[in-house]
Amino acid sequence: MGECERRLRLDVPADQVWAWLKIPQNAFSVNIFHAEVEYDSDEVTAGSVVTVIHDFFGVHKERRHARVTEVRPYYVAWGEYLVPNPDSKAKDSFPHRQSFEILALDEHHCELVNRISGKYKFPGSGKLGEPMFRKYMPHILDDDLRVIAAGCGAIPAADVKMPKGLFLWPIMASAARFTKKSTRRKVLEDMKKQQRAAAKP
């Protein structure tokens, strides 16, 4: 079982971050592999299921369910798994649990915490899974945090770049094409427009 935790300090109040992050369409849109979020409500409770369409570099798509296990002020956690499909023999290659937490440091500063635990399950994962997890997961979680920071207005959206560490993975050569369709890209583009409009005299 691989585990990873990443943190990011923000110079904004915890309430500002939570006001954005508690909306499921936002929380489940920050990941680089998410192409579409299907959920009708603006809030989740324990037991809520959010459908997330994943697009891995434009060459493989999956329909996955994120079942919320806990939600409270400044915290949301879920378990994610492949949606069973009777017409497919595909198995879940990465069942995992993830959470976002906001730690209030004072009235004007907070720290974002992104935690994930899971295990790769694919041919060869016994040897390759753990090294892949250790090498690439920190870059993915760091990117989640920076997109959240941009989404809530803590940093300029233009400052969020493609996570460079991922390009070390050969298949990432197609990532630029993939991200044009991602929910992550939409979050950043929407915030860029809002921030440009706010900057006008």
Image: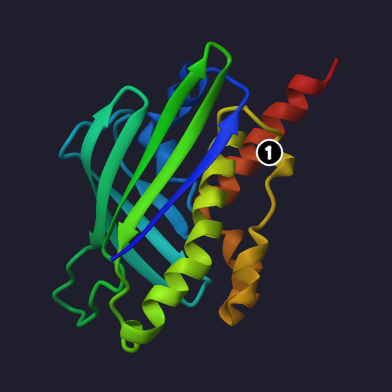
Q: Residue furthest toward the top?
A: 107
Looking at the picture, how far across and down is residue 106, in whole percent? 52, 14
Quadrant location of residue 4? bottom left
Q: Nearer the viewer, residue 151 or 59?
A: 151
Check disc 1 and report the residue beneath it.
157
Quadrant location of residue 155? top right
Looking at the picture, how far across and down is residue 33, in whole percent? 47, 60
Q: Nearer the viewer, residue 52 or 135?
A: 135
Q: Residue furthest toward the right?
A: 201
Give the amino acid at mark 1: Ala
Answer yes or no: is residue 32 visible.
no
Q: Residue at x 61, y 35 (%)?
A: 150
Q: Residue at x 62, y 42 (%)?
A: 188
- Please name the colour scheme applied to the rendered image: rainbow
31 shown above or below 166: above
Q: Nearer the viewer, residue 104 or 80?
A: 104
**Which part of the image, by quadrant, shows the C terminus?**
top right
Asked whether, in this view, residue 146 is left or right of residue 88, the answer is: right
Looking at the picture, how far across and down is residue 76, in whole percent? 31, 35
Looking at the picture, how far across and down is residue 9, in whole percent? 58, 32
Dot 1, how many residues are within 10 Å of its Cα: few (below 14), some (14-19), or many (20+)?
Answer: many
Q: Residue at x 15, y 39 (%)?
A: 47
Q: Residue at x 71, y 34 (%)?
A: 156
Asked whether, in this view, residue 92 is left or right of residue 194, the answer is: left
**Which part of the image, by quadrant, shows the N terminus?**
bottom left
Q: Secondary structure at mark 1?
A: helix
Answer yes or no: is residue 161 visible.
yes
